[in-house]
Image (spheres, rainbow, N blue to C red):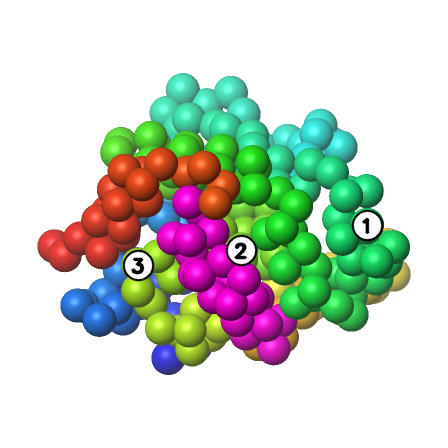
Amino acid sequence: MSTPTDPRQIPLSTAYNARELGGLPTPDGVTAAGVLIRCDVLSMLTEEDLAALRRAKLSAVIDLRGPEITDKVKSAFLDSREVRYLNIPLLTDPQRLRDRLGGMELHEAFLHHMGDLYCAILDCEGEAFAAVFAALREETEHGAVAFHCTNGKDRTALIAALCLELAGVAEEEIVADYAQSEARLLLKWNELPEGCPVRPFGIMKTPAAAMEQTLRYLRERWGGAEGYLTACSVPKETIALLRRRLTAQP
């Protein structure tokens, strides 16, 4: 099972939660390396960080953050000539999410009801998920694709979970991959100066129960990742192609 010292981790000095989705066990082997990278925000990358991502054969970045954040914290790849940058916000309608959560404020959901929040995002953001998977189909043809939000643990985790479930990775491995984000983000927290006006530490947490609830809902409500993506109007050809790319053996 995955651990915080997983060799899939990509060592970046300015991003703490970057790791390959390759190397996780499937019924026929392991997920393919060099296809997908999940990470936190890629904004202030050093030359060493950029070199590490080149070694990972990065060809595209999908930024899941909304314009209220991307305008303030810009991506290092916004004007890149080497890496294609796509901004596909995954939280497009906060009010619809609040309604789906019975009027709960989103910060409350992020802190104390993460599983409920993830299930609500699946229900409310089908078009955004379809756009992300269309981009994954296109961009993985050219090299590794990184996808991220701010901390790489919520929106990013939902994309990762769908991809891994599609590839046949067992639930316990998907949950373990999700849960290891907390250990990585704790390193980031510990480096912040005392008194820094950041959000509560609870926002950094990735409890296994939240992803377990989400995967159970995905299975019972939608019939798994393929059923969900099909309901979001993702073409069957896209689903089959991504599955092949995620499970191709060297």
Name the kind of residue labelled 1 in the image: Asp
126 or 191, which lies in front? 126
Binning the other alpha carbons within 10 Å of mark 1 as few (below 14), some (14 to 19) or many (20 upward) gives: few
Residue at 56% x, 30% y: name it.
87
Identify residue for label 1. 99
Label ID, residue 158 = 2
Residue 160 located left or right of residue 40: left
Identify residue for label 3. 167
Q: Say if 199 sits above or below 52 in the image.
A: below
What residue range appears in magenta? 209-230
Q: Secondary structure at mark 3?
A: loop
- Rounded to the nearest angstrom, the CA distance separating label 3 from label 2 is 14 Å
- Rounded to the nearest angstrom, the CA distance separating label 2 from label 1 is 20 Å
Residue at 84% x, 58% y: name it.
102
Q: Is 214 colored magenta in this rendering?
A: yes
234 or 37, which lies in front? 234
Q: Quadrant of residue 20?
A: bottom left
- Rounded to the nearest angstrom, the CA distance separating label 3 from label 1 is 32 Å
Q: Position of residue 196 (x, y in %)?
A: 84, 56
Name the kind of residue labelled 3 in the image: Ala
